[in-house]
Amino acid sequence: MLMRTDPFRELDRLTQQLFGVNGTATRPALMPMDAYRFGNEYVVQFDLPGVAPDSIELDVERNVLTVKAERTPGYGEGAEVQVSERPRGVFSRQLFLGDTLDADNITAHYDAGVLTLRVPIAEQAKPRKIAISGGSDATQINA
């Protein structure tokens, strides 16, 4: 099971919208996320439009998954910026991965500005059938 780590996420998002705060290395901006279970895995999708794939970092340490990315301005030095509304800077998100997830086999794919992670459910957490012997015939039940 995936668990959120930041109870003040909505407050931070509102502050960013009101004051136009961009992410910095010491105070990264949040990235929108969807997470759902599909079969024997969890799928987590992060919106990272305009982020170069080589600027995305994924780390897992002690069942904490950290996603970090940076979007830099597309205009060069010396440009006279008239409007700058697109968020840029450092974006970061952390998720606690429960013990029932297989953190060693996470896969990542980045396409069209969406980072998709697939986190498989650990084998020991999957339902399994247990054979019962005795009597005249053996039957199976769900565990």
Image (tube, grey):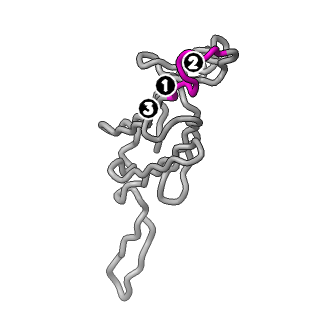
Residue that label 1 marks: 6
| Residue appearing at x 42%, y 39% in the figure | 54
Give the SS element for disc 1.
loop
**Between 4 and 106, the one nearer to me in the picture:** 106
Given the image, on which type of amino acid does mark 2 rest? Answer: Asp
- Alpha carbon separation for disc pair 1 and 3: 15 Å
Which residue lies under the disc numbered 2?
Answer: 12
Q: Residue 65: x percent and y percent?
A: 39, 38
- Residue 68 got which mark? 3
Q: Which circle's residue, 3 or 2, is located before the other in the chain?
A: 2
Q: Which residues are magenta?
A: 71-81
* Of residues 4 and 60, the one drawn nearer to the viewer in this rendering: 60
Disc number lying in front (1 or 3) = 3
Q: Residue at x 58, y 15 (%)?
A: 21
Residue 121: numbered disc: none
Q: Is residue 74 magenta?
A: yes
